[in-house]
Image: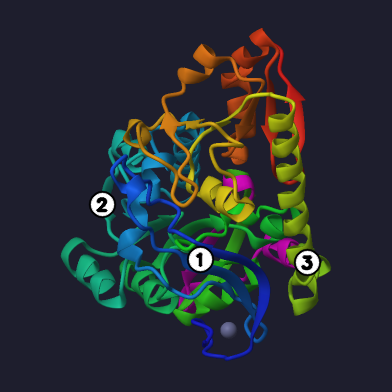
Amino acid sequence: MNCRLCGSTNLASVVDLGATPPCELFLSAEQVDEPEMTYPLHLRLCTDCLLAQLPPLITPEETFTEYAYFSSYSDSWVRHAKNFVDAQVERIDPRFVVEVAANDGYLLQHVVERGIRCLGIEPLSPETGAEVRAEHGPADLVVANNVYAHIPDVVGFTKGLRALVADGGWVSIEVQHLLTLIELNQYDTIYHEHFQYYTVASAQKALASGGLSLVDVELIPTHGGSIRLLAQPTEHAGEPTQRVADVLAREKSAGLHELAGYTEFARRVAGVRRELLRFLVDAASRGKTVVGYGAPGKGNTLLNHCGIRPDLLAYTVDRNPYKHGRYTPGTRIPILPPEQIAVDEPDYVLVLPWNLRTELAAQLSYVGEWGGKLVFPIPHLEIVEVKS
Ligand SMILES: [Zn+2]
């Protein structure tokens, strides 16, 4: 295996989560009686360029369905997108905005509202970047949110961004931050659709591979801790801001600019699994009912890695109607509409999209009416009483 960024063969194991199905392949009732493919889920670190990566075992075409969850079904995502557009209009006053992997338009709707010309396109290669530029002109702002981890050809994709952006323009990328993933045990965000996991240090190298330079970075709360990378074409980019230096310093002090910072992670992941299983087995022994809330992709990494099946988690619920009547991949836990929780009044609700904790704690406050409790598995098992 070679590093996809620098070609090195020096790949060290960070954590091996076993073999699981692709986390967005929810099963229909018929598929529950059919076999299911699993793929190894083994995160490795290139000790030369420090890019954390999974081998590209599934194709990107199979992977973009997760946006059904991100977009309109989450209030906080829609608000996040509006705040981003407001800030960028204030900062650079773009005349033409292109969003890559634009999902259902939940971000660009706010650009349209402002009367700014915009375009949503599929993920890029250098050729498609040049084609879009030739047809529509260079973009003042290229937005690539929640896609930079999803493209195995990171060098080609980055060259595509460079081809598309105006010489003095900006590229804005939001991607999960490996620093918080490691520090807060967010191992369930490792799944086959995420081919690479970035520190600011490795993102700088990835951007440089396509002719872009990191100028600024913001730490943002999405996915439990993400980075917004603001880059410009290398030949036109200014000096990196103090914020870039500050985040790099934090990563360095966490040990993430060398292999040493990654070696304890697998042990802590095993601890999360033991805590959750101990709770679920104990609840089952005491005759308590536990159901899930949410059926996000990351929930399936957790459920499969822990080996949780309907005997320990009777069902989960989700706001996305596409998932109703389907089953979680690998673990085959039924997915029902959220209203089922109030009908059954379970003793515990295990919250799988823990990154929306504040939003969901408010939404689920009714669980307190019958004395139910919320359970958060990550970073450590936490059982929370809710006031109705
Ligand atoms: Zn490398």
Magenta residues, start to end: 223-248
User: Quick one: SS at disc 1?
Assistant: strand
Q: CA distance from mark 1 to mark 3?
A: 19 Å
- Give the residue at mark 1: 231
Mark 2 highlights which residue? 119
Among all residues in the image, which is located at the extreme right? Answer: 253
Residue indicated by mark 3: 249
Q: Answer yes or no: do the residues labelled 3 and 2 have beta carbons within 8 Å?
A: no
287 on left or right of 174: right
Q: Amino acid at mark 1?
A: Ala
* Disc 2 Cβ-to-ligand 1 distance below 8 Å: no
**Residue 4 located left or right of residue 271:** left
In the rendered image, residue 92, in percent from the top left (x then y), is placed at 45, 51
Residue with the most extreme left position:
135
The colour scheme used to paint the residues is rainbow
Q: Which of the two discs, 2 and 1, labels the residue nearer the N terminus?
A: 2
Instruction: Determine the residue positioned at 43% across, 33% down.
Output: 335
Q: Specify the quarter for ligand 1.
A: bottom right
Q: Give whichever of 360, 293 is nearer the camera.
A: 293
Q: Nearest the camera: 105 or 45?
A: 45
Tell me which corner region of the image, top left, top right, bottom left or bottom right, holds residue 348. top right
User: Looking at the picture, does residue 32 appear above or below residue 217?
Assistant: above
Say if 302 sits above or below 315 in the image: below
Find out whether the residues at labels 2 and 1 contact each other: C-beta distance under 8 Å.
no
Task: Name the residue located 65 percent from the left edge and 78 percent from the top edge.
Answer: 50
One can see residue 102 in this view: no
Under circle 2, the secondary element is strand
Q: Is 231 part of what is drawn in magenta?
A: yes
Q: Label 2, label 1: how many angstroms apart (C-alpha)?
A: 20 Å
